[in-house]
Image (tube, rainbow, N blue to C red):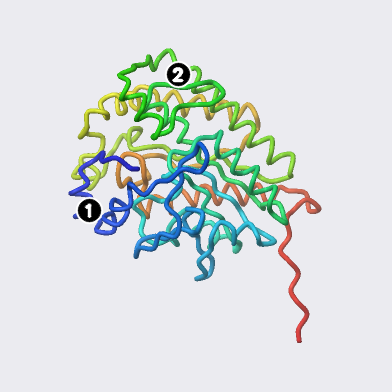
Amino acid sequence: MVRPMADYQKIIELRPEMSEFFANRRKIGLRGDVLTYWPNTRTDSFTTDDAGFRHSTLKGETLSLADCVSRDRYGIALGASNLFGFGVAGNENCLPSLLAERFGFAFANAAMPGANSRNLHSLLVGLIAGARHRPAVVILSNGGDLAGFCESSLADPIFGSPNRIQLKSIRASGASANPEKNFPSLLAFSAMWTSAIAQLCRAKGVPFVLLHQSTFFEKKRPTDIELNCRLGEVSHPSQELQFANHRSFNERFYAKRTAFAESKGIAIAGAATDDIGFIDEFHCDKDGFRTVAQAVGDKIESLLDSEPAGEKVKEPAAAPAG
C-alpha cells in the first residue's frame, strides 16, 4: 500500500521497472496486527516467497527467508519497505543480497511494509526460536518508527504509531493529533524496542548493527533526476501533514536515535544522505543500496573481526571427499 508521493509518471518514465512495483502497491495483506507483502509474487523486477518476504540471492541462488535461516551461517536484515527495496529491480540489488555477495553467506530480507521496531522484534524472536543455528549478524532498519508517526502524528510509548490499515479508520473519524506533544512518546517507543532487539542479540551472542538509512527530506543537494521527479512536493492532501512532520522531526529523531545507540554501545552504520540516490522520498535507488551496503558491510566486518575466536559463528565443515 504505497500511496503516490512524488511524480510517479515521471519516475516510471525514467525508471520503467517502477511500473511493476507500483502495480503491486495494493497487494498488502495482514499477519495478525502487522502488514505483509503479498506471497508468491512473480515479476521481472522482484519476487516474494510464500510468506511475503522478498527473496535474497547468493551466488546466483534465489533464497526465501526460510531458506536463509535454515542454513548453518546466515544474517538477518530487518526493516520496512526501504529495506525491501521498493523500486529496485533485481533481488540481487537489495541490501541483503549485496551483503551476502560480500561475506559469502546468506542474508534474509526480513522486511514488512511499514514495519516498526516492535513488530520487527517479534519477528526476530520467532526467527531465532525456530532456527537450528543463531544468526551470524542482525541488521535493523527501523525508520518505520518515524514514518508511521509522520503519517499519523500519533505514537504510544509502548505500542507505537497506527499502521496504515488502522490509519484509515482514524482519518475517517476526523480525529487530529498534536505531533509535537506526541513526539516524546515516539522516541520512548523507538528506544525501548531498539534496546530490546539489541538485548536479544547480546543474549544470543549475535553481532547487531543499527542501520542509519535516512530519507530524501534530509538531503541538502538533490540530484537532477530527484528534482525532475518532484521529490518532496505534495501531490495528495494527506501528504501536507506527513511531509511537514518529516521536515520538522526527521533531524531530531535521527539525532536522538544516534545518541541513544552510542549510549547503549549499539553499533550504527550508514552512508551520508547526500551520497544516496532516492527513487521517491523514502526509497533509495540501486546505486544508493550499494553505497549503504559498503558502509554497513564495513561495520559488520569490524564486529565479526572483534569477536572472540570461540564465539564466532563458523562456516560448516566441508564434507569428506568421496
Q: Which of 253 and 142 is in front in this view?
A: 142
Q: Which residue is drawn at 32% across and 20% down?
A: 173
Residue 151: x and y, percent? Answer: 36, 28
Q: Which quarter of the figure has residue 102?
A: bottom right
Q: In which quarter of the image is the C terminus?
A: bottom right
Q: In this view, does 253 lie to the left or right of 120?
A: left
- Numbered mark located on residue 12 in the image: 1
Q: What residue type is labelled 1?
A: Ile
Residue 194 coordinates in the image, percent (x, y)? 59, 32
Of residues 140 and 103, the one nearer the viewer is 140
Q: Is residue 131 left or right of residue 122?
A: right
Q: Which mark is residue 183?
A: 2
**Label 1 packing within 10 angstroms: few (<14), some (14-19), many (20+):** some
**Position above or below: 59 against 190:** below
Q: Describe the element under mark 1 as helix, strand or loop.
A: helix
Q: Which residue lies furthest to the right in this view?
A: 310
Residue shown at the point (63%, 43%) measured from the top left: 208
Q: Give the left or right position of residue 293, taking residue 224 as reference.
A: right
User: Would you place residue 298 above or below residue 246 in this image?
Assistant: below
Amino acid at pointer 2: Phe
Q: State the quadrant of the N terminus.
A: top left
Residue 291 spot, x, y in % from top left: 43, 50
Asked if residue 185 lies left or right of residue 199, the reply is: left
Check disc 2 and report its element: helix, strand or loop: helix
Judged from this view, the residue extending furthest toward the bottom is: 322
- Mark 2 vs mark 1, CA separation in Å: 35 Å
The earlier-in-sequence mark between 2 and 1 is 1
Total tally of numbered discs in the picture = 2
